[in-house]
Amino acid sequence: MEMEQLYKEHSDRVYSYIYFLVRQKECAEDLTQETFYKAYKGLKSFNEQASTTTWLLKIARNVTYDYFRRKKIVQFFTFEKGHDIETKSLSPESLFEQKEQLAKMYDSLSKLKKDYQEVLVLRKIQECSIQETAYILRWTEAKVKMKMTRALVALKKEFHKEGGHTNGSIKRI
């Protein structure tokens, strides 16, 4: 596969994954570029054991963790209050309520253990399969399932502490 095509097809997903981890636009852009540089260098060794997207997300995770280690960043990530959500036919009151609930959800997510955050971001936000998540995190599929179950319980508990109410939003984040 040609590198330019690879970038066009996957850069948005890689960028959004990294952005969820670092929460800084410029940093996410730099790390996305570094991810594709490393992918370019490793393209010949890519044995298609996983999908291209999964392979790139694994590289992105490693690049981001290297960045965290270099910067000695302790907190995995934090969420800001203003996120884009679908607003097609919502009243201003409903839109406000939805944004408030989403902000509480992200606040709750940011307070979870790092491995819970990772599995939730990959499975529910990035929509990776169990197999892809296991590959990216270097876990077994059983561990992904177990951590996902525990992470959802912990998120629900934390979300209620934040004053959020669940109307199915925990399941779809």
Image (cartoon, grey):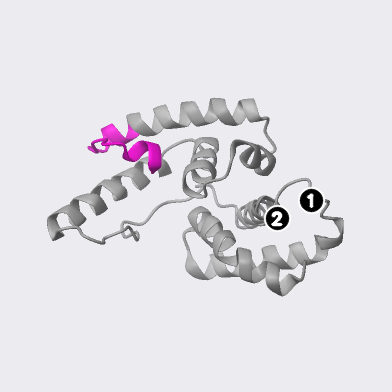
Identify the residue shown where x is 73% and y is 68%. 37
Q: Residue at x 34, y 61 (%)?
A: 84
Q: Which mark is residue 48?
A: 1
Indicate left or right for 43 with 144 as reference. right
Specify whether residue 19 is painted magenta. no
Q: Which residue is mark 2?
A: 52
Q: Is residue 166 visible?
A: yes
Dot 1, crowdedness within 10 Å: few (<14), some or many (≥20)?
few
State whether residue 31 appears in this view. Answer: no
Q: Helix or strand or loop: what does disc 2 sit on? A: helix
- Viewport quadrant of the C terminus: top left
Q: Amino acid at mark 1?
A: Glu
Question: In the image, 161: left or right of 127?
Answer: left
Can you tell which quarter of the image residue 91 is in?
bottom left
Q: Which residues are magenta?
A: 158-173
Q: Which mark is residue 63?
A: none
Residue at the outermost front position: 89
Based on the displayed image, in which of its 4 quarters is residue 166 positioned? top left
Residue at image location 35% in from the left, 37% down from the top: 170
Q: Residues within 10 Å of mark 2 (few under 14, many from 20)?
A: some
Find the distance from the CA under tag 2 to the CA under tag 1: 7 Å
Q: Identify the secondary structure beneath mark 1.
A: loop
Contact? badges 2 and 1 (CB < 8 Å): yes
